Image: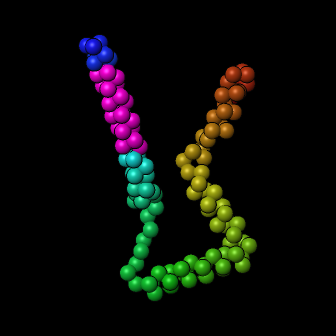
Amino acid sequence: MQRIFSALGQAFRNSILILVTVSLLSLSNLFIFANQPAYAATSSSANINRTSDPTEDASFREEAYEEAAEQARNPDKQDEIYNESVKANKGPQAENGLVEGAKELVEKVTGQGDSK
């Protein structure tokens, strides 16, 4: 009789332990999914300047549109803007970029770099 009670007690303890484990896992999943929308609203993603005056915002948009339309009408201006953009995007790595570094490394390995 005592064996039966000890076996039932052990089974009861195991079922409670499993129930507690499953409930803690479910609870942790709730917290994980609850925080995801908060990550989307971080201030580091984009800095948007909002003005209190909607007419000022509209005039800024209109001015930007007119500037873009003027640039689209003038092909010489497009080339100039493109070149400025390329220069700005190259930055400091333009002097010794990845391709140039790879070329130098290939020259060293093949022995052609000694002639410099």
Q: Nearest the camera: 113 or 99?
A: 99
Q: Nearest the camera: 13 or 80?
A: 13
Q: Is residue 114 left or right of residue 3?
A: right
> Residue 40 at x, y = what percent?
45, 57
- Give residue 53's quadrant in the image: bottom left
> Residue 102 at x, y = what percent?
66, 33
Quarter of the image that includes the N terminus: top left
Count of numbered labels shown in the rendering: 0
Q: What span is in magenta?
A: 8-29
Q: Nearest the camera: 1 or 86?
A: 1
Query: Going 62% across and 62% down the picture, which residue do you hit?
Result: 84
Q: Against 50, is 30 above or below?
A: above
- Give residue 2's quadrant in the image: top left
Q: Is residue 41 left or right of residue 113?
A: left
Asked if one can make out residue 115 in the rendered structure from this viewpoint, the answer is no
Quarter of the image that includes the C terminus: top right
Q: Indicate whether residue 64 is drawn in magenta.
A: no
Query: Going 32% across and 21% down the picture, which residue do you hit?
Result: 8
Q: Is residue 76 left or right of residue 86?
A: right
> Residue 7 at x, y = what percent?
32, 17
Q: How is the image coloured?
A: rainbow
Q: Against 33, is 99 above or below?
A: above
> Residue 108 at x, y = what percent?
67, 24
Type of secondary structure dominating the magenta stretch: helix
Q: Against 67, is 111 above or below?
A: above
Q: Nearest the camera: 86 or 38?
A: 38
Asked if one can make out residue 110 in the rendered structure from this viewpoint, the answer is yes
Query: Going 55% across and 82% down the picture, which residue do you hit?
Result: 63
Which residue extends farthest left?
Answer: 2
Which residue extends farthest front?
Answer: 1
Query: Going 63% across and 76% down the picture, which residue do you hit?
Result: 68
Which residue extends farthest bottom?
Answer: 55
